[in-house]
Amino acid sequence: MTDDEVKAFLLQRPRFLSEHPELFFALELEAEPSGEGKAGSVVSLVERQAALLRAKVRHQEARVAQLLRVVEENNAIHQRLLSWIRGLLLANTQGQRARQSVLGLAQAFSVPFVRLVAWEPEVELQKAFRGLQPDCQILSGLGLNVPTQNEITEMATALAHPICLPASSYQAGLAFLGVGGQKGAIDLGISASGSAALLPLRVGLAPHASGLLVLASDDAGRFSQDHGIDFLLSIAEIVSACLLVGPRSSPVKRKKVKGDTQG
């Protein structure tokens, strides 16, 4: 019989091999050079299938191990995030909250560079920022011309959520200029081969950004979109809620009227 006749026979009787399982041990295939046999050698069909299954199991084991590492890393980040939030909740003043938002964040997550810049913070926060420079900055006090300030605020407003990008990118360079003053990234000591995360800060659901939190590292893989931005989004929302809440109004005292027995 020719090869074509054998193929046609098997196609016409798809259960033939099931009815004759002894053929699995007699049929021979070329072994793949994967440790199970040398190139050019032959193995039975059963041995070949077993080798393929073992390779698939090894791949699945490696995948599971990788997922477990990711879970452990996310759990560690979650614990550090909770510790950082606890510090914010224990802060009693805007100065303490600003310090924890920047310096506490850098320490909790071992980020080499963290700086916060706000456009027009309330008076109390302005005083706090002056005591925390250069880690906390007011945009108008950086000595930048108005067009550059507008470009920075427009760039931050255009960000619907935090982004990660190379330190050499245009947006990162503009952000470094915003937090570092006229010398920009040169003054900050950030390597062009590093990476950065830009976190726009907003008052509630305001469409326009009121500030920008910048995280950077000389490690090119430290901040990457592939890693996800869920934690960065949480950080941006928490810092915005803690600092950029607008002027706090004093409670209105109710005038006492005659015969009023309530405090």
Image: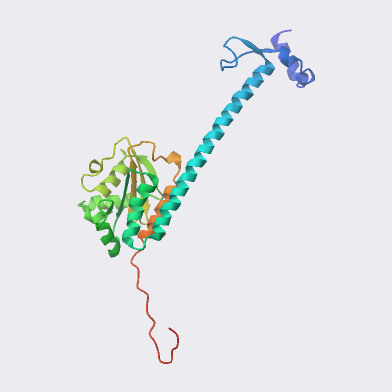
The answer to whether residue 230 is seen in the rendering is no
Which residue is at a point 50% across and 39% down the rendered structure image?
70
- Front residue of 69/44: it is 69
The quarter holding residue 237 reads bottom left
Q: Work out which quarter of the rendered image holds the C terminus and state it.
A: bottom left
Residue 40 screen position, x and y as percent: 58, 9
Kindly give the residue lying farthest to the bottom in the view shown: 259
Residue 249 screen position, x and y as percent: 35, 71
Residue 180 screen position, x and y as percent: 25, 47
Q: How is the image coloured?
A: rainbow
Report the number of numbered marks. Answer: 0
Q: Work out which quarter of the rendered image holds the N terminus and state it.
A: top right
- Front residue of 74/213: it is 74
The answer to whether residue 59 is seen in the rendering is yes
Query: Does residue 24 appear to the left or right of 179 in the view shown?
Result: right
Which residue is at a point 26% across and 61% down the rendered structure image?
127
Query: Does residue 118 appear to the left or right of 204 in the view shown?
Result: left
Residue 121 screen position, x and y as percent: 30, 60
Look at the picture and state if 115 lies above or below 94: above
Look at the picture and state if 8 lies above or below 139: above
Look at the picture and state if 222 lies above or below 203: above
